Image (tube, grey):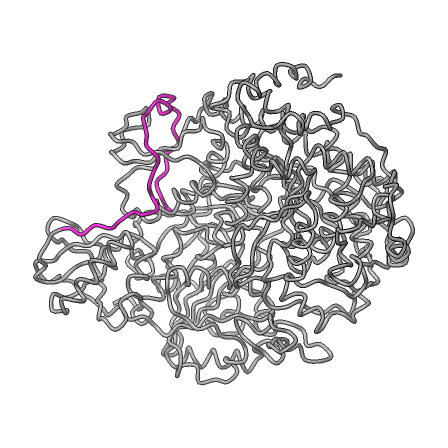
Amino acid sequence: MRDRALSWKPLSIACVVALAFCICQEHSPLLGRTQEGQSRVEAGSTDSGAQDAEFARLVKEWTTLPEFLSPLVDHLPVVAGIPSPKDILGHHIGEPRKLTYYSRILKYYRSLASSSPRVKVLDIGRTDEGRELVVVAISGEESIRNLEQYRAHLAALADPRRLPEAEAQGIIAVAKPIYHLMGGLHSSETGAPEMLMELAYRLAAEDSPLIRQIRDNVIVTITPVAEPDGRDRYVDWYYRYLIDVTDERHHLPGPPFWGKYVYHDNNRDINFSQVITRALLGWYLEWHPPIIHDLHESVPFLYTFSGQAPQNPTLDPILFGELPWFANFEMAQMTRYGMPGVWTHAFVDAWSPGYLGFMASNHNGMLRMYETFGNGGATTMKRKIERESEPSRSMASRQWYRPLPPYKEVEWSIRNNTNYMETGVLSALQMTAAFPRIILENFYRKSVNALAAGRKGPPFGYVIPAGQQDMTRVAFVVGVLQTQGIEVGQAGTGIKVKEGEFPVGSFIVKLNQPYGRLAKILLEKQEFPDPNLRTYDDTGWTMGLMTHTDIREISDSSILDVKVERARAGNMTGTIRGDSPTCGYAVVHGGSNFMITFRSRLPGVQLQVAEKSFQAGGTLIPAGSFVIPGSAPPDTLRQVRKIVTDLGLQAVALQAEPQVGMHEADLPRLAVYSTWGSTQDVGWVRFALDRFEVPYELIYKERVRQGQLNRNFDVILIPEQAESAKGLVFDIEPASRPLAYTRTAEFQSLGMYGQSDDISGGMGLSGALEIQKFVENGGLLVTLGSASLFPIEFGLTWTVDTRRPSAQFYAPGPIVEAEFLKPDHPIFYGYPSKPVPVRYAGGPLFQVQEKYREQQVLMRFTGTEKSVLSGLMKNPSEIKERPAILDVAAGKGRVVMFATNPCYRWQNHGEFNMLFNAILNYNDLEMK
Ligand SMILES: [Zn+2]
């Protein structure tokens, strides 16, 4: 069947002229294009020009079996004036024991760009540690010269509201798809940043029919390394420790950090908190690549994502046709080349929208993803794939989606990995180049469908009412939606719809916009389609529930007609009611996470916390609010007003002293404890503390073992980390030699965010004893999620036990209801006394002896079917009335244990205050 787009071609050209898209005739991309659906080449044909004989010989040598090589990558052209990777790096890609540092990678791309008119490097930002972030564009000379024009074409297709169908077809006829490749998001997955350099060279330099067709019809863009800080740290670590490991049984751990904060979770940053993820999203929303292809490494030999169930049903169904279309083509091509182990199913599903590359699917494009087989470095290694205990589930087993399975045992090299990845990517590009208009047509159609879905409803939109008690979390939600490219409006008048009346200034998200579907995905309740399906990450993320903000789903279509202006939520300013305070100010604790910021911005100033609510000038000031006395110096009062305004808080001028109990809001000397072996969830807590300006010291086993902890700290916070108490205490198994994480002249990226002469061994029993002493002597220990197993199993809180749920219980990150048993406890300052949504963290099920329950249990899970608010929890009765937060006195100190993780991935902002309140009221937690 002929492609529909073809029949519009004559009309399209006319439209293009009419629209004055300034593509000169002699450079018309149409001239160089093969007919849609035709591939100019059967793969394997190569460039007839000069070839690099050394490359061909070495690649054969480095590939461990002949079938791990393909005709697409067994050769490399030599072109005068265009540097190959070897010309700049000194070695061919895939040489054993060679990994490239980021600055050398950048140097290569810049050299290529300066010598080839087919390559351009775009700057898109900086990392936490100041490294440049770039996107490299490679295509035919004409495309690179007119890159801005092609960007504009895709931007036009991405927003069909101002684009009549005929004009769209005109654009589709002359536009080119951008196919974006991303490597190096996960630093231990070292192959893609190497492979992409060779691919870039091949695309720029090779003159085979296949490569010419790709250059003519596709614009390839590349993120060379998505996490550059982590790349350099990992390469340092590889050269220092891993380079000689040739048998996976002698595997050593990786470096404690990749990037500054969140390690592997840089692929789970659903709210785009990190600078690297934000930079990429910013670039994406400008350039609109219909495809992002994210290159990962984990399983043998090449898994290509096909979008298996559970699938998010709000996404366009076209996507779920496109994904296997690509995956099956790659599998067929590579299998035809004789490469075993290419498969497409039974690994990653299409439920969570939170993976970084998913930004493409979320914005009417397509996320594609590979997992190839990496050795965590460049050393050739013996790998065993068959797991003896479960041969039927082995990835070496034959399945319908794995007709030519990987081998059970293999000697594997980084060149094998390069061959697989590059052959797969070239096959994907081959298909894109053969069907460029279908890719563009699909992209456009998904955007059109998104508009139609919003008009068709219900729901038709969401309203975030103005006047909520804490507008800073509303600002957070609106800010995230806008960062995602979602239009958020604000009405100049009150709104009246079927669901009720909303005041002036309420935020409106209409779903008849290009990214309306993404808005719906982020704001709706997640209804998991089948409780018998497993999923790869969280099942629930509803933003209103995660942030404890009131967000209403609107099924009244008149919401689409409300006149709105673009919302300006980012600079939400605070308010101060009343003037000339004779008795100072009260800063209202309405649940804002900036309360603790307010405190830390006034170091040295005495602040009181009201322990009960009180009235001031007709305003109810809730418990937990700060009170600044009128006797404070005028300069302090001025500062108070400024900080309240800057942070979006609310203050009330007091005309009389509050007649309620108060205690001092002194900030503790806070330590955050991290193991060396699992820094990721600690990283999210560090990130939140940094963003809210809470001072702390990051400590490791070295400091704990020194003892005398009370001398330096009032509070020790142990964020979620390790899966067991034993894991937390003993951490990394000692290796045959010490694994120092220290900065040296040779290894400049190591020793950041802490140093250790040997990261193995954990705090050990002596460390556990020091923490116990810290508590006995009056310190506060706060443990989150799985870290709460530690005080329980090591006997710091011997009135508490834990249990594991049964095998029938399955709860991958849903949002559930919890109820406060002690609503007046300082941990709940700023919260309503009714049940609240919390993210279920899969932590320990606490068991408290009956006689202590009333005293120690602060919050518990409701545990009914109805209390599962979003996502999946199978058999919620297993957590029925189970404690979720405990406050246990021990010696002169206390231990506050969360079964939840109140500081999870910059996501559950509604729960953050349970942690912040514990910190702020650390020496006043005992209820009077
Ligand atoms: Zn990965």
Q: Give coordinates of residue 105: x percent, y percent.
A: 67, 58
Where is 585 relative to 289, above or below? below
Can see residue 43?
A: yes
Where is 894 relative to 810, above or below? below
Q: Residue 312 versus residue 418: which sits nearer the camera?
A: 418
Residue 567 within the segment the image draws in magenta: yes
In the image, the segment drawn in magenta is 548-577
Q: Give coordinates of residue 857: x percent, y percent.
A: 39, 60
Can see residue 310?
A: no
Q: Quadrant of residue 506?
A: top left
Residue 124 within the segment the image draws in magenta: no
Position of 96 with respect to 761 (left or right) is right
* Quarter of the picture holding the N terminus: top right
Q: Give coordinates of residue 75: x percent, y percent.
A: 86, 48
* Quarter of the picture holding the C terminus: bottom left
Q: Quadrant of residue 556?
A: top left
Q: Residue 441 versus residue 401: which sits nearer the camera?
A: 441
Q: Residue 28 versus residue 65: which sits nearer the camera?
A: 28
